[in-house]
Amino acid sequence: MSSITAPLRTPVLSVVPIRALVDETFKVLVENLSPGRPVTVRSLHHSEDRDDWEAYGHYISDHRGTVSVSDDSSFGGSYSGKEPMGLLWSMRPVPGSRPGLRLRKRDITSPLLVNISVYSGHEGFRDQEPLASVVTERWYMAPGVKRVEVKEQGIRGTLFIPPGPGPFAGLLDLWGGGGGLLEYRAALLASHGYVCLALEYLRTSEMKSGKNEQLYFEAAFNIIKFHPQVMPDRVGLFGLSMGSLISMYLAAESAAVKPRCCVCISCNHSYLPGKHITDGYSGLLKPVTSTRFKSALCQVGKISCPILLVNGQDDQNWPSVESAEDLRAAGKEHLLTRLTYPNAGHLIEPPFSPHFRATNFKNIITNEKVVMLWGGQTKPHSDAQEDSWRKILSFLQLHMYSSSSPRAKL
């Protein structure tokens, strides 16, 4: 008597949408498995720095032979439980990688490519050929967003303009003490309807010349303010780390910069009028004492615009939560919106970005290479990034647009 062998099932893997902005969710579905089959779903990204990053979850297919990452619980891996976007936010360097890595997109005119694969079983998946794979595109810059390099009045930056005639609200985007020109957040904000200037400021010849650095930021602010597609009375400031320090200083001290509102992530305001940023930069790399810190605060009581402070309670880089208290104490409670997240660290980025508790860092003054401790625990930090980004966009919508803002989508 001959036996009939059931044909092997070929798993079908889908990612929807396969092309999306980085702050949009996706659904990962594996179908046509045998019921009760253990599988591993893995994401893999080869970075611009030529490092490999991965995340993975262990699943068991249901009675229909299906695994839905959005609906089913992972039994272990780089994340566990029901985590629809765990394949992105729990990414980390593959075993054997260089220490202290940080994943950041430099070329925002191309997508961040993520290979999603499904493997048989829960062990040894890295040594297997995948049962099925799909490459998904994650974009910071939506279709129709214009990227314009800015090299005028000594300013170095990149301007991002949403699609359509406008007029739009505008934002000056300021990053932190690592220096360089980072464009990805500005591109994403432009994808949500804001003309946004990503500004480099620590390494420019204009800043190194010893000229009044406040004039540099005021000139950058005016580039946005007087752009023909921008409403001149609706320009705000957006800063992280040292960028939040500069945002607070400008809002408090500058007669030329009158922001519609400010978003300050991991804020600090230890900035003395008349001092150079490089002086403050060097000081911030030293151990903080309460006496020295309090003696170097800018006058936050002069701030007259709405301000959103986003802070992690496990910020190991500088006292951002304490800085937020100073604004309240200065009588600015009516202008202040505070988001404080337990077990989140210093580097609160757009949603689904990997968490970095400590990374390599180069002191741009001395060229010394160190490992910088940022803080945070992966799961609560990732939750903070997702929640704060949604609330940041709502805050900007409320204060920058009186009606629904234009938003580009993929």
Image (tube, grey):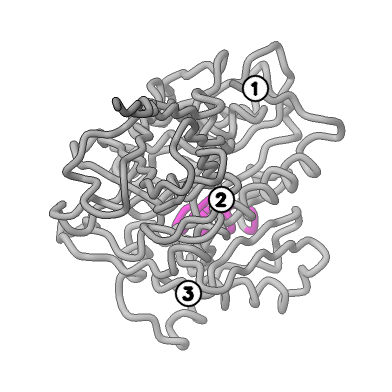
- Disc 1 marks which residue? 408
Question: Between disc 2 and disc 1, whose residue precedes?
Answer: 2
Which quadrant of the structure image shows residue 369? Answer: bottom left
Q: Is residue 244 above or below residue 24?
A: below
Closer to us: 60 or 52: 60
Q: Which mark is residue 370?
A: none
> Mark 3 near mark 1, Cβ–Cβ under 8 Å?
no
Foreground pick, 237 / 91: 91
Q: Amino acid at mark 3?
A: Asp
Q: Quadrant of the C terminus?
A: top right
Give the spatial CA distance, label 2 vs label 1. Answer: 31 Å
Q: Residue at x 76, y 38 (%)?
A: 400
Q: Look at the image and say whether residue 243 sits in the magenta stretch.
A: yes
Q: Position of residue 326 (x, y in %)?
A: 64, 76
Q: Are marks 2 and 1 in contact (CB under 8 Å)?
A: no
* Of callouts 3 and 1, the N-terminal one: 3
Residue 102 visible in the current orientation: yes
In the image, what residue occupies the spot 65% across and 22% down?
408
Between 287 and 16, which is closer to the camera in this rendering?
16
Residue interval drawn in magenta: 239-252
Instruction: Decide: few, some or many residues near mark 2? Use Cα within 10 Å; few <14, some 14-19, many ≥20.
Output: some
Amino acid type, label 1: Ala
Q: Residue at x 65, y 77 (%)?
A: 325
Residue 300 location, quadrant? bottom right
Q: What residue does disc 2 label? A: 72
Instruction: Measuring from the top left, give residue 228's x and y in whole percent.
Output: 66, 16
Under circle 2, the secondary element is loop
Q: Residue beneath label 3, please? A: 314
